[in-house]
Amino acid sequence: MKHLVTFLFALSLVSSAFSADKKLIVMIAGKPSHGPGQHEHNAGIQLLKKCLEQGAAEQVEIKHHLNGEWPEQEELSKADTIVIYSDGGGGHPALQEGRLAQLDKEMKRGCGFLTIHYAVEPTIEKGNKEFIDWMGGAFEINWSVNPHWDANFKEFPVHPISEGVKPFATNDEWYFYMRFRKGMEGVTPILSDVAPDSTMSRPDGHHSGNPAVRESVKNKEKQHVAWACERADGGRGFGFTGGHYHKGWANNDQRKLVLNAILWTAKAKIPTDGVASTVTEEDMKANLDLKPGQGLPEKPKPAPKAK
């Protein structure tokens, strides 16, 4: 009996040590936005969480927050990386109240930072400098653009985030022409493609076009729509501009690349063939926001006026 107790005690110590070695990933989903199947922050975060638990459960502990809920400081202080999938601009959850200062404190100790789709966009007045510091680049109005287009990713850099990812093509609202660090210091483009001329079909505007990006597209320069960065404080960042359409997460290679990136920013080990996961049709439908045509009834059309 004594030997059994000793064995169980030793086993509990091993288990506790193993748990302590896990990386804490804090995932934040923004509030509902856009139409059905678009900007599905809540469903997207929960799907990515489920997939991480499929392919890397032994390495990670995941805490997630929905509908723009912000984590407590104690949780943020223990995070190995923070993932935000939300709307951006002035409504960005990271820009409210004193949250930017909270995040800055965690970044300075080496915490990872990863944003998806609209969440790559802070405002010029608030967050632009910090986001560029934390993840190497950010969407900047009157510089970056947000067209919908077919991107074809044929090759990837030699980088842990690329592990097991095969070439893929997908239609999305791939933002490009980010405001990157000067000289791309510490920044590695992960997904790049030449944007078609059709991306410049809109007039100049905050998000639609400007002379600089028009010249870049005209010259057939490769546009970077996902990138990784390493910071002087030891932290890592990643920006991913796709994710407008929820259906994009059904693409195995798009999903794998983002799952790899989450592990990389948390300084966890990426499997040789990348994070393996599978999603079913039921998985893709799970946790979608209530919207007309997606759990809420369509608004009735007004009756025609009597003549």
Image (cartoon, rainbow, N blue to C red):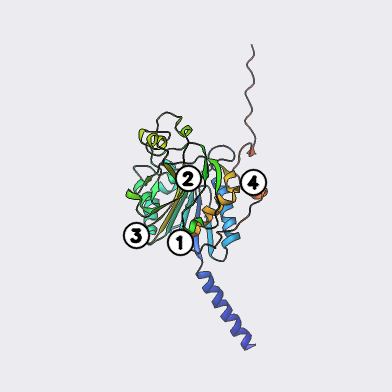
Residues at marks 3 and 4 touching, judged by CB atoms closer than 8 Å = no
Specify the quadrant that holds the C terminus. Answer: top right
SS category of the residue bearing label 1: loop
Residue at the disc numbered 1:
80
Mark 1 vs mark 2, CA separation in Å: 22 Å
- The residue to which callout 3 is attached is 232
User: Given the image, on which type of amino acid does mark 1 rest?
Assistant: Asp
Cβ atoms at labels 1 and 2 below 8 Å apart: no
Closer to the chain start, of discs 3 and 4, is 3
Label 2 crowd bin: few (<14), some (14–19), many (20+), radius 10 Å: many
Q: Hey, which residue is sitting farthest left in the picture? A: 182
Q: Nearer the viewer, residue 267 or 188?
A: 188
Judged by depth in the image, the label closer to the viewer, 1 or 2, is 2
Q: Position of residue 288 (x, y in %)?
A: 60, 45
The Cα–Cα distance between marks 2 and 3, rounded to whole angstroms, is 24 Å
First in residue order: circle 2 vs circle 3: 3
Return the residue at label 2.
241
- Quadrant that contains the N terminus: bottom right
* Quadrant hosting residue 217: top left
The residue wearing badge 4 is 285
